[in-house]
Every structure is written in C-alpha cells, then in structure tokens.
Amino acid sequence: GRPTDVELECLAQTWSEHCKHKIFNATIRYSEPGRSPEEIRSLFKTFIRGTTEAIDTRIRERDGSSWLVSVFHDNAGVVAATERYHLVFKVETHNSPSALDPYGGAITGIVGVNRDPFGTGLGAELLCNTWGYCFAPPDHGGPLPEGLLHPRRIREGVHQGVIDGGNQSGVPYARGWEFFDERYLGKPLVYCGTVARLPVDVAGRPGHEKRPRPGDRVVMVGGRIGKDGIHGATFSSAELTEESPIQAVQIGDPITQKMMFDFLLEARDRGLYTAITDNGAGGLSSSVGEMAEIPGGARIDLARAPLKYQGLAPWEILLSEAQERMTVAVPAERIDEFLELARRREVEATDLGEFTSDGFFTVLHGGRTVARLPLSFLHGGLPEMRIDAVFSPPPERAFEPAEPPADGAEGARIAEAFLARHNLASNEPLCRCYDHEVKGLTVVKPWVGRDRDVPSDATVLQIDHGSFAGYAVSDGVFPSYSDIDAHAMAQAAVDLAVRRLIAAGARADRIAALDNFCWPDPLPAPDNPDARHKAAQLVRACRGLAEACLAYGVPLISGKDSMKNDAVIGGRRISIPPTLLVSAIGLLDDVRRALTLEPDGASGLVVVVGETAEELGGTEWAAHRGVRATGVPRCRPEAWASRYEAIAGAIAAGLVRAAHAPGRGGLLPALFRIARAGRVGVEADLDALPAAGDPGWEARLFGESCGRMLLVVDPQRMEELRSRLAGEPLAPIGRLVEEERLRVRFGGRDLVDAPMERLTAAWKREFRR
C-alpha cells in the first residue's frame, strides 16, 4: 500500500509551485495600517479570473456575444480575430535555468513557449515571438557571490539563446525590451512570448476545442527522452542555491521542433487527432496527466517511449523535460494513418497507450504497474496553503528638488547623461540579431523612423496574407515602482501597455492582456524576515491589475507566476524587486492605417494629452539622481478609459500624424524619440504642459506620470482634435522644425538646447561598447 517512487515523483511535479500555483490559489489574510484585515480566497480566482469573467459578462451584455474564445483552461488564451482565425497569445518565463546556463535556459525558454500556443485547441500556427529580460547591469563591478555568473555573461548567453531558438524556427520576433537593476544579480528574469493563429474551423470541428475520448491512443511526437530537464518543475519552484542542479536545465533543438510542428499542422488539417498538448514542465507526467482529465483517465507504458540512451528509471522517463515533444490523442481507427504520415515526414511518433474513463492515471513499465493515481487526488488532493500578508508602507519621503540647469548647454549635458543610462539607451545592435521579417507579415517593425533606429510603441502584424486585418503587441513593466507600492507598479504597467497599442492605431474595445508575475519568495523562513510584506505586495499588485483592467475593459486571457526569484548564496539572500510584466494584444481592422511615432515632415504641433504631476518616486530620473522618494506615479484608469477611446477615434479619423506613449524617463526621451524618428527638430515650452498642481522642472521633463499621450497634429486640425477630446486636458507644447535640434524651455529660459546628433550619439554609445 505504500506509494511507488514514480507516484511520489509524479505528485511532487504536479503539486510543485511551478505547476500548481499554490501561492496564487492560497487563502491569504491581508492587513495594512488603517484598515480591517481581509481574507482573500485565491488571488487568481478573485483578481484575475474574476476580472476577466466580469469583463466577459459586460461584453456579452453590450454586443450579444463575446470575443473571448478560450481563457484559463488551455495552454494559452484565445480571442476572436477574423472569420477565419482566432489569435492565441502566451508569455512564459525561464528564470532559474537561465541563471545556471544562460544559453541553454534561454533557448529552451523560447522553444518551450512556442509549444504552448501550438498545444492550444487543436494546434495554432506560430506568428511571432516576443522577449523581455531583467538583468543586473552588464558593467557590474561589485563582488560576485560564488556560483553566480557575471551579468554580462548572462546577458550575452540569454540573448544568443533566444535569438537562435526563434530565428532557427522561422518565427519572427515582434518586439523586446531590457530592464537593469542590481537585484537581478541572483536571478535574471527571462520572458518569452508567442502569438499564433488558430483556425476557427479545423476539419469540421471548432479549432479551439480539444476532445480526447476514451479509446483514443496516447501518442508522443517529436524528440526522444533523456535525463535533461529532470526535476525542472521542482527546480523552478525553489530559490537558487549552490546545490541547484545543472541537469535540470533542458536542451533545446529548434530544428527538430520545426519539423514536428510542420507535421502536426498537416495532421491537424486532416483531422487525424482530437487533442494536443505540449510536454513542458513535468514531461509526460504533466501532458498525459492533465489531458486525461477530459476523458477521465489514461494508461501508458513507458517501456515503449523512445530514449536518447539506455539506463533511465521509469520515473525519469515519466518526468523528463527533454524538449521538442508534444502529446496528441489519436482515434484508434486513425492511428495507422497518423504514424505513417509521421514516418513520411521523418518525425518520430510513438503510441504509448490509451485514454480511458476509469478515473485513474495508470503508468506501466513493460508488464509492471509503476504508478496508479486517482485523477481526483492527483489534481485535487493538494491541501490549500494559508499565507499572512502585512503591508508596511515606506515612510513618506518627499523628492528633493535640484536646481535647474543654468542654461541650455548644461541641460544638454544632463540630457546626454540621462539618455545613456542602461534603461534608456539604445540596444539596437543586439536587437538587430532578432529576425523580425521572416513570414513577411510585419507591418510596423520593432524599429521605426527614417533611419529605422527608434523603438516603436507597438509592433503591428497582419494575421495572414489574405487580408489587411491585423494585430499589435505591446508591453509595460515598472519594477522600480514596487519598492514604493506594487499597486501603482501594476497599474502603470497596464496603462503603458494599453497606451502603446492606442498609439499604434489599435481598437480600444478589442485589447486583451497577459499578466506575468515574478516575485521574491513570499513564504516565511528564518532567512526571509520580510516574507509577509512581499506577500502583501503581491496582493496589492493583483488588486491594482484588476482595477486597471476592469476600468479599461481589458480582459486577462493568460499569464504565469514565478514565485521563487531569490538566490541564497553563502548565507546571503538576493531577492529581485517584485516585477509584473503586462503584455497586451489589440486588433486593427486595417494595418494600412497603423500609426508610428515618426512624423512625416518637419511641420506640425506637438500636443500632450493628459496631466503631468509631481510624481518622481521610483522613476528613472530618481535613480539617476540617487534620490529615494515615495511620490510614485499613480493611475486613474476609471477616468482615462474614455480618453483612450477618444484618442483611438481621432487616430482612426486621420487627425493624428504621429503618436507616442511616454514611459520610462518621461517627456525628454519621448520628445527625443519623435525628433529622431522623423530626423527633425522639436521646440517645446513646458509652461504649456497640462499639469496637476504645480510640478517642478524635473517632473515636467523627466516625470513618468501615467495617462499621457504625445501627438503630432497639423495646426488646421487642432480644433477638430479638441472637439473629439472635449473635456480632456490637452495642449500644444511645441512644434516640429527642420533643424535637427531639441530645445526645451520652462520658466522663460532654456532647460535643454542640444543638437540631435549629440543626443543620438550619447543614446547609442552605451551598448556599442
């Protein structure tokens, strides 16, 4: 009656934090000063699924049907797009493996997330990839704890791994970003995402539905099984230590995966299988064990599984995360046809067993039963976690103002130094190694402007070559805000992701988002004294995310959480700042009407919509000055939703020649990017800036107040713009000029007066070294 080693390993994988999301499904007792404690039954159900369900109901009441096709019960989120296709989107992280083996961990991250949309519904064809990384500064010169790799080595390896994984798979990279902070020294964050298209109809069946039936064969397709990646799920559920196993890092092979994908798309369109999922964390244990819930059981024989080499124990075969594998359910009457097609396409496919309805996940090895677990216990037997969360707000600290520059020349030197910061500088040389043109569907590129060297707000792509319908992808991430308030951090991320889509011409009523939480360990331990505060930060971030998404009508269609982003080396704990990446996708009816931040000529008014406030806490300027303040940028999404709808309408009506959503660094880098994109100059007067209160020169020039948009508008269209945006704070603050020079005034004198050539050289200098 004792459990076997296979059963114990299967339970450990299934119940790991990585797979079961125990923290997001825990009951949390949250308290903060001045409020009564509250009990939250599952952050996921309350703030994420609950938000999407509320928005879905709102959409159905308004339109009679919903464009949310499949959320929260498959490998990726699915939204309706055209009569022929749905869009599928998923973002994952591969942090722990990339800390140990940057290249191997990263290449597995991208090919792994490719399998999630491909394993959604009956299989979605990949359209584009996204990437984003959080590193310690590459010029880190301080002590390096034993066992940790230098940030420069990690950065180079991660970039090369993701570049190779996507380029060799024939999938374009839509966009990417980097953020630098010393606290990512222990664990980098490696985000990889994929958008795919899923046919509405597949061989007479709804493309988003998978229906494995009792009697269908369990077939593994793709690469062979080895020891690589064993315990990957449990390894990713723990902090990094000196004993972290390098063999937990999987080995990616994008060419093998591409051949497998091509074969499976052909099999899909022939109707040769009824369900598909990927072999990711947990391998066959996860893919078969989870798919078995639909028909009610599964029985497989591990002795049939193809191995890279002999000597694997049954539990190793079951749990190996060796890459490039999918599991499909094939009707018994079609199995010979399926296997013959695989043989002709030179893709390995192996019949491992069958789906049943007996309520058990049964695993054999030859004639011996090595595991037999009730599905109800495997997927529902984990006790619920209980967590205490106590928010301790930082002591109020005002921003200490600096004296304004004596003249425009001094301001130019300040601007050069600011634009050269790691978090603002151009990383174009490395980004150019990512192929964004393959497939020929990219309309607005990751880099835009006359010289194609300015990052776009969002990348716009066609869904297929047969129509001009398209979509845009964007992102928002503000880890530095979480030091002050994770609620503000989460809302700022949503707000920027939405504004970027609006700036690209996306429809305000067809935006969906993904949430990817990366957090330091919020569970108490002797060496983790502030665990309850970290848990409270998580609660506040989830609440802020939900409030912003509800206000903007942006459903959360997928996401992921990574809750153990700490390294404990030599008794020292290095924890990342709480980090939430919000990735957004929005529809465009016609990609030919997409917009960029590039003005088409040296004329036009530069208009700011939205107010600037004295909010410099957590900003890049505060970091540049080394000032700690608590006045973090705050959002008012319930007041701004109509603003974004109005701006989207103005763009659709052709009133706007260029648009840009200011983000990190504030107005200075935003004005610089517009000027650089158009190879023009900008003259601006910040006295005209719409403002809340009386912000100083630093807040006006470098503040990151949310809710703002920069527009380039013809003077003769200004009144029409005011009419469309009636009631919104907006004002022309300057104009475009032919001389390539950035001149910014405030209080009757120059703050910055600099040739664009000098600013551009400073902006491009840091990552050309």
Image (tube, helix red, strand yellow):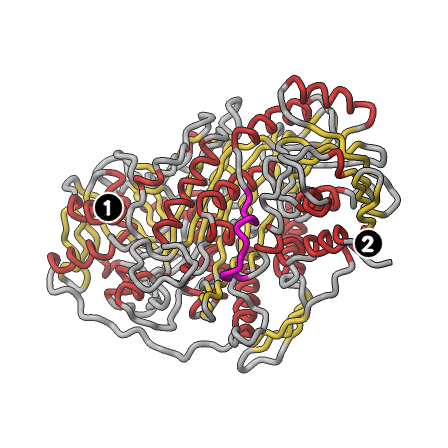
Q: Position of residue 192 (x, y in %)?
A: 50, 44
Say which of 673 and 378 sits in front.
378
553 lies left or right of 650: right
Circle 2 packing at 10 Å, graded few (<14), some (14-19), many (20+), is few
Residue for badge 1: 769
Quadrant occupied by the N terminus: bottom right
Location of residue 413 with respect to 487 vertically, above or below: above
Mark 1 and mark 2 residues within 8 Å of each other at the beta carbon: no
The circle drawn on residue 376 is 2
Disc 1 from disc 2: Cα separation:
57 Å
What amino acid is found at the position of numbered circle 2 in the picture? Ser
Residue found at x 68% / y 33%: 306
Helix, strand or loop under label 2: helix
Circle 1 packing at 10 Å, graded few (<14), some (14-19), many (20+), is few
What amino acid is found at the position of numbered circle 1 in the picture? Arg
Location of residue 305 with respect to 290 vertically, above or below: above
User: What's drawn in magenta, residue-wise?
Assistant: 239-250
Snapshot quadrant of residue 204: top right
183 lies left or right of 406: right
The circle drawn on residue 434 is none
